[in-house]
Amino acid sequence: MRDSERGAALLAWYDRNARVLPWRISPQDRAAGQRPDPYRVWLSEVMLQQTTVAIVRSYYRRFTERWPTVTALAAAPDAEVMEAWAGLGYYARARNLLACARMVAARHGGRFPETAAALQTLPGIGPYTAAAISAIAHDEAAVVVDGNVERVTARLHDVHSPLPAARPELTRLAARLTPKDRPGDLAQAMMDLGATICTPRNPACTICPLASGCAAREAGTAASLPRKTPKPQKPTHHGIAWVAWRPDGAVLLETRPPRGLLGGMPGFPTSDWSQTPHDSPPIEADWCDAPSQVRHTFTHFHLHLLVRAALTDATPARGTFTPRDSFSVTGLPTLMRKVWEAAQSACGPQS
């Protein structure tokens, strides 16, 4: 099967089986003249980095209802956007989201550039995101390669070189499938195929539209591809989190530094995260230890936090007390929600 035939077969399958996603224009609507909003394509692609479609749906809807345009998002206060992002993780994405929106509003008149090269000059937009926006929203014949596309391409051509070293070869092979007509639909078809049929485990080869031209299926190696270089074992870091209440119910919070993990997010004061964390409470109190530690995993390490809680009316050396009626657990990052839950089993008022 030639590449042009593969592309045609995949688009025909996509026309019948495209997933219904809140940020997507269906093949039928696109054929009728509707065009994707670059803002919504960009927002969904940023949210989908390191996050599943199931989780992103609700966040996407809330964001677009609250900030329906890039200029509306650009004008939003940092704290409101960070709070709305809470729970999605990888908070550098939220900081870049605001920086990008503000640059588009200030320097591009509220319109996203139309080429992948120009899009990569914006904060937080790398080669993959730029290709996805330019192909889906602007019909540029850009090569869109995410994890699904890598898997489909590796199996289609029976590529045994392990990732990440194989990425240049897989990108070159994927480019051969990218047509000048409907490049965005082809990219989304590859994503859907990888998400629903050419899955990591137990690929459904018997119903795949590319089965007759799949080298890995013929060789019997599809289920083992793509191969990946083993990741090094993650180290474990330790720390202390302090949860303090005043008698009136106010909760001690601080905003983390703008750079680094959980940057710019509100949370409970913590120690450094290391092998031997420095025990320096943010306020004088008679601290009670929670019976179990909080465990959380970041990209490069595991974190174990000892949680200490106290009721105190002293003046804090770090952070500020937030009135109880202004405090929202849902506005905290996932790690801090775990800390709050653990603190309830120490001493202090219940949530």
Image (cartoon, rainbow, N blue to C red):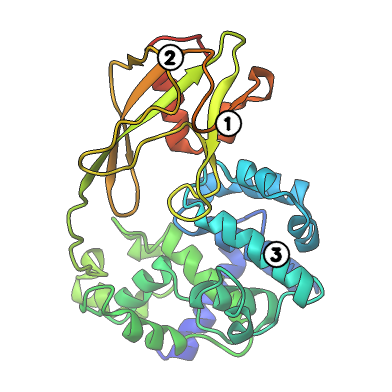
Q: Quadrant of residue 158?
A: bottom left
Residue 25 in view in this figure: no
Q: Which residue is mark 3?
A: 101
Residue type at numbered disc 3: Ala
Separation of residues labelled 1 and 3 (CA atoms) = 24 Å
x, y (%) of residue 214? Answer: 32, 78
Q: Residues within 10 Å of mark 3 (few under 14, many from 20)?
A: many
Separation of residues labelled 2 and 1 (CA atoms) = 21 Å
Q: Earlier along the polypeptide chain: callout 2 or callout 1? A: 2
- Drawn side of residue 333 relative to residue 237, left or right: right
- Drawn side of residue 232 relative to residue 17, left or right: left
Separation of residues labelled 3 and 2 (CA atoms) = 41 Å
- Drawn side of residue 108 relative to residue 317, left or right: right
Residue 293 in view in this figure: yes
Q: Is residue 22 above or below residue 151?
A: above
x, y (%) of residue 171? Answer: 40, 83
Q: Quadrant of residue 286?
A: top left
x, y (%) of residue 287? Answer: 36, 15
Image quadrant where one finds the N terminus: bottom left
Q: Which mark is drawn over residue 8?
A: none
Q: Which residue is mark 2?
A: 310
Q: Which residue is mark 1?
A: 330
Marks 2 and 1: CB-CB under 8 Å? no
Q: Earlier along the polypeptide chain: callout 3 or callout 2? A: 3
Q: Is residue 148 above or below residue 306?
A: below
Residue at the (28%, 74%) spot, across then down: 164
Marks 3 and 2: CB-CB under 8 Å? no
Residue type at numbered disc 2: Ala
Residue at the (45%, 33%) spot, across then down: 269
